Amino acid sequence: MADFSSLGLSDWLVQQCKQLGINKPTAVQENCMPAILQGRDCLGCAKTGSGKTAAFVLPVLQKLSEEPYGIFCLVLTPTRELAYQIAEQFRVLGKPLGLRECIIVGGMDMVSQAVELSNQPHVVVATPGRLADHIRSSNTFSMSKIQFLILDEADRLLEQGCTDFTKDLEVIMGILPAKRQTLLFSATLTDTLQELKSIAMNEPFFWESTSETRTVEELDQRYILTPEKVKDAYMVHLIQTLTDQHDDWSIIIFTNTCKNCQILTMMLREFNFPVISLHSMMKQKQRFANLAKFKASVYKILIATDVAARGLDIPTVQVVINHNTPGLPKIYIHRVGRTARAGRNGVSITLVTQYDIHLVHVIEQQTKTKLKEYPVEEKAVLKILTQVNMARRQCEILPCTQTTLCKTLLFLIFESDNYERI
Ligand SMILES: Nc1ncnc2c1ncn2[C@@H]1O[C@H](COP(=O)(O)OP(=O)(O)OP(=O)(O)O)[C@@H](O)[C@H]1O
Ligand SMILES: [Mg+2]
């Protein structure tokens, strides 16, 4: 197996990697880094937790050290939390360079971002919406000389879904030079390959891991079949069992909407579970604060919408619970990929109701993995059923009964049209 030096990395970068416990390149790094260092465009498709971030950060830092200037590299990513995480990798690995990076995401102060951009940072990590806003509203910075454009979670950036980035991407592409290196990474690139190839125009190097399955072997994938009405009781029982057995485990519970996320959080608090939430209707500062508390294990359970499904790297996460069965296999792949990362073990448990069985079949077909049943003691679930359902109902009507200002405001926010967002 190759080491980082033989892939063309300088000694100072190899040392940086060592300090972080990154000693041997992963397959995506071994295969993509030489092509990137040779100056080629690159499409890298590798499983969740396989080190795609370092596969682009390291070659960019190497090239930047040879000819440092700003703005040298632009990284686009679909979520704000992920932008911070990527910037952090640049900051840590690029420390000896005195790297200046800047994060441009929505929900944060636009004026200070504009000042940072005008100071010509080496690397800009951005979500498309806010960067496009800066481009539309000011001319105090130029990206006409960037060497690298990187799209992390590239398929998500290009897909037209509930958050559609295409208009913002057009604005951004409009100010980038045609002569540049374009690097596209995701665990699920293949559906969008044609669109991606048109962005990375000069004969991109394409690498995809050859494995039969699309999820990692270290992941134990389970399901619990439950009638819709008993689902919450199953979840409460499951969390109780997991937390009783493993008090050091962190758990992410994914749910489909902000409203559900909020209600489940309130409901699980009624049962004294250490839960905190993350969804797109929260203020950005709160989102960052909650994620930080979860990462630091102050709270062991994070209830999140798909805003947390991609890219987040939190080593303590041992279990992912899908409170709803994802409608698309690729959402499933990213969600369960929040555990069992970098060779560690992990468990995913999907709650499947009578209406979701066909979705599980599609997931199994696409991931080429069979989900196994997770054994549950039904009697124990039935014992808590009434209590759980009452707790849920109470949380749904909470603002009427408990009129603390904060909860009433939440209710008003969630009654708006954005109620069903992720
Ligand atoms: N060569 C390596 N050896 C050991 N650990 C590594 C190596 N490269 C990266 N890592 C670590 O592996 C973890 C996962 O990496 P990363 O977040 O880049 O995965 P990813 O492929 O981008 O996953 P996702 O598809 O979920 O975004 C990180 O904590 C990272 O520090
Ligand atoms: Mg990633």
Image (cartoon, helix red, strand yellow):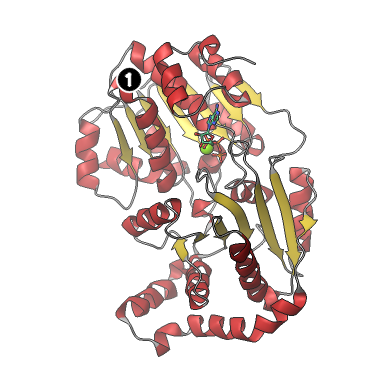
Q: Residues within 10 Å of mark 1 (few under 14, many from 20)?
A: some
Give the quarter of the figure containing the N terminus. Answer: top right
Q: Nearer the viewer, residue 417 or 223?
A: 223
Residue 290's spot in the image, x, y percent?
39, 58
Residue underneath mark 1: 145
Judging depth in this view, the residue of 281 and 388 nearest the camera is 388
- Say if 138 sits above or below 276 in the image: above
Q: Is residue 180 visible?
A: no
Element under disc 1: loop
Which three-letter amino acid code belongs to the residue tagged 1?
Lys
- The x and y percentages for residue 366 are 75, 45
- Is residue 215 depicted above or below 356 in this figure? above
Q: Estimate the x, y position of residue 197 in percent, counting from the top left.
A: 58, 27
Measuring from the top left, give residue 172's x and y in whole percent: 38, 35
Where is residue 247, by image quadrant? bottom right
Q: In the image, what residue occupies the spot 43% across and 38% down? A: 169
Q: Is residue 213 above or below residue 40?
A: below
Residue sitting at x 41%, y 88%: 400
